[in-house]
């Protein structure tokens, strides 16, 4: 642990002396570097920062961060992270999980940490597979995925993490890609600055068990045509020369991606992104990647409300002021009680 210091820290100051043990080429390496860079740019302090994880490849994260950390149990990271934040609201709490850990065995915990709006940053590494346990299909795996647990192909519809988060009441939703080192730090910084639960889905390549599953929108040759990076207050454009855009289908509410020249429209006819528009965010994450629509990335939704931990702190303070001499024993023995002899 770094000693308290006034010197400006660098990304290296947030790296531990532990050997990073992920498969060569794993997308987790890039995410780790981006997080360390972000913390340095935010002038975070190791002694005030905590990383909490569950089980999975991504959950090794706390070992590699020169901060406080908890490597907990499968699916239960949200409960531990909530406890840490309530015990010391001044701590900056980050939660690292995967699509299996966070959305399968941990789905119920994820739902409640989002609806409660606990002030933590949730980084969900989505590689659409169980990597640590050797390649079983996960809740986000696509239909037809062949794996040790689905040798003839998965028949389940895949879960959309951002749609799940919106449905659970999350107030901050973002998406990024493990290799996008230019944009990821700014998205992580926005998540950290948001007061409340911040949900960031990171498309992460598993080079061993699900290699290139996102190649249709991450490969350099196609990325500009397949990625829509939304920015609040700006028209939704994409393409090598921003020649494509998103608009509502004339006479309807549905979204469509169009070539502006072919459609005979200009940038002024396109949808302008509004971070606070819940309906728009829902439409964007559900349309993303469907029927030729680009993959939506960036800050999709951000509409803050009081966080759970801030309200709990206020509730405790109010109770202490109202009943400064409250007695726990008196409370426990109030009302109907009985003695066992």
Image (cartoon, rainbow, N blue to C red):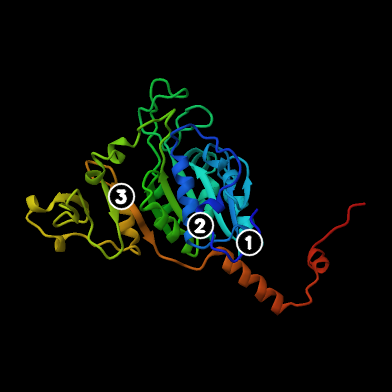
Q: Residue 50, percent across and down?
A: 60, 54
Give the SS element for disc 2: helix
Task: Give the labeled residue for mark 1.
Answer: 86
Is there CB contact under 8 Å for labels 1 and 3?
no
Q: Residues within 10 Å of mark 2 (few under 14, many from 20)?
A: many
Question: Residue at 42% across / 36% down in the picture?
Answer: 128
Please tell me whether mark 2 or mark 3 is closer to you in this view. Answer: 2
Q: Is residue 303 visible?
A: yes
Checking the image for residue 296, the label placed there is 3
Task: Give the quadrant of residue 222.
Answer: top left
Q: Residue 141, percent across and down?
A: 40, 34
Work out whether residue 27 or residue 11 is closer to the camera in this orientation and state it: 11
Give the SS element for disc 1: helix
Task: Give the labeled residue for mark 2.
Answer: 39
- Judge from the rendering whether residue 272 lies leftward or rightward of residue 187; answer left or right: left
Give the SS element for disc 3: strand
Which mark sits nearer the N-terminus, 2 or 3? 2
- The span from disc 1 to disc 3 (Cα, nearest Å) is 33 Å
Q: Residues within 10 Å of mark 3 (few under 14, many from 20)?
A: many
- The span from disc 2 to disc 3 (Cα, nearest Å) is 25 Å
Which mark sits nearer the N-terminus, 2 or 1? 2
Work out whether residue 189 or residue 201 is closer to the camera in this orientation and state it: 189
Q: Residue 25, percent across and down?
A: 43, 34
């Amino acid at each position: 642990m770094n000693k308290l210091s006034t010197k400006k820290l660098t990304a290296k100051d947030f790296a531990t002396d532990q050997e990073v043990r992920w498969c060569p080429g794993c997308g987790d390496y890039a995410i780790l570097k981006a997080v360390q860079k972000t913390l340095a740019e935010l002038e975070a302090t190791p002694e005030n920062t905590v990383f909490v994880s569950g089980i999975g490849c991504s959950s090794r994260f706390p070992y590699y961060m020169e901060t406080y950390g908890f490597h907990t149990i499968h699916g239960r990271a949200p409960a531990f992270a909530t406890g840490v934040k309530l015990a010391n609201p001044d701590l900056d709490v980050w939660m690292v999980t995967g699509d299996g850990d966070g959305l399968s065995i941990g789905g119920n915990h994820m739902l409640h940490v989002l609806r409660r709006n606990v002030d933590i940053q949730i980084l969900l590494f989505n590689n659409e597979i169980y990597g640590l346990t050797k390649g079983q299909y996960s809740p986000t795996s696509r239909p037809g995925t062949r794996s040790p647990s689905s040798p003839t192909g998965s028949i389940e519809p895949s879960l959309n993490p951002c749609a799940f988060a919106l449905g659970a009441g999350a107030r901050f939703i973002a998406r990024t890609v493990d290799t996008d080192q230019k944009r990821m730090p700014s998205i992580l910084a926005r998540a950290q600055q948001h007061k409340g639960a911040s949900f960031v889905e990171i498309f992460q390549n598993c080079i061993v068990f699900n290699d290139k599953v996102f190649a249709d929108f991450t490969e350099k040759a196609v990325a500009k045509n397949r990625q829509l990076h939304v920015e609040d207050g700006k028209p939704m454009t994409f393409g090598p020369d921003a020649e494509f855009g998103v608009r509502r289908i004339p006479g309807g509410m549905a979204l469509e991606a169009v070539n502006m020249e072919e459609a005979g429209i200009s940038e002024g006819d396109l949808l302008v992104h509004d971070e606070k528009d819940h309906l728009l965010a829902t439409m964007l994450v559900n349309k993303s990647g469907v029927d030729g629509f680009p993959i939506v990335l960036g800050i999709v939704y951000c509409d803050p409300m009081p966080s759970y931990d801030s309200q709990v702190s206020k509730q405790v303070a109010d109770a202490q002021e109202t009943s400064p001499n409250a007695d726990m024993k008196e409370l426990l023995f109030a009302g109907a009680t009985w003695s066992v002899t």
